[in-house]
Image (cartoon, helix red, strand yellow):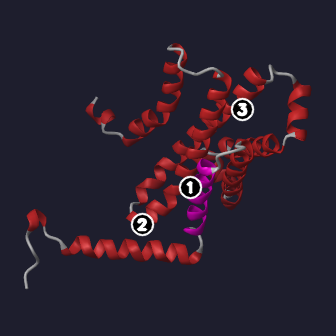
Amino acid sequence: MSAVLRNPKLWIALLCLLPLGRLIALGLGGGLGANPIEFITRSTGTWTLVGLLVTLSVTPLRRLTGRADLIRYRRMLGLFTFFYASLHFVTYIWLDQFFDPAAIARDIVKRPFITVGFSAFVLLIPLAVTSTHAMMRRLGRRWQHLHRLVYAIALLGVIHYLWLVKKDLTEPLLYGGALALLLVLRLPWGVAALNAASTRWGRQAAGRKPDGVKPAG
């Protein structure tokens, strides 16, 4: 039992389920506001975007900290992102459009933010389907090329949010800034800066002695 509790994946999974638990608790307690459908749609959409950014942050954090094991959690984070994207999509087609294909098609064509959001969700599907180790082996190098779609998906997610919000753009712009930073850190000089910072911090840590003992000399 203690070994299970020490498993980081368990705590990451529980953390990722907190937004869903909050929605359920609010729903049962009548705390979803005057427009529950809009509340659920906004919440699941926000956590989808947060999931995308957190998933994209794994590689920069791995380079910065030198912890190669962080990569083991990226797939889980990506699948939870797809989970919230699916909840977002199902909320829209079920509670908002009542499974009306004609109404959904008109929305996709006539409302740009719906078009962009729908495109992002469609692009997420092959990434989720090919997230297994078996698919990685089967696709080989093509797997990496396919999963680079996550950059376009994250960009579409930010645009979807920007076009949805009509007045206060602060929050979507913050997400856009975070995405821009994560993309910059994937450029050659961004990677070099992360590696240099990691090396510098590693040297500083190696120069310290336990219990506050200073190095001799």
Q: Is residue 202 above or below residue 97?
A: below
- Residue 196's spot in the image, x, y percent? 42, 77
Q: Is residue 188 toward the left or the right of residue 22 in the image?
A: right
Q: Which residue is mark 3?
A: 89
Instruction: Give the number of the disc on residue 64.
Output: 2
Instruction: Give the number of the disc on residue 56.
Output: 1
Q: Are marks 1 and 2 in contact (CB under 8 Å)?
A: no
The question of residue 27 being in magenta is answered with no
| Point 78% across, 46% down: residue | 116
Which amino acid type corresponds to the residue marked 2 in the rendered image? Leu
What range is drawn magenta here? 170-185
> What secondary structure predominates along the stretch shown in magenta?
helix
Instruction: Give the number of the disc on residue 10.
Output: none
- Secondary structure beneath disc 2? helix
Which amino acid type corresponds to the residue marked 1 in the rendered image? Leu
Q: Is residue 143 toward the left or the right of residue 194 in the image?
A: right
Q: Is residue 207 above or below residue 76?
A: below
- Residue 54's spot in the image, x, y percent? 52, 50
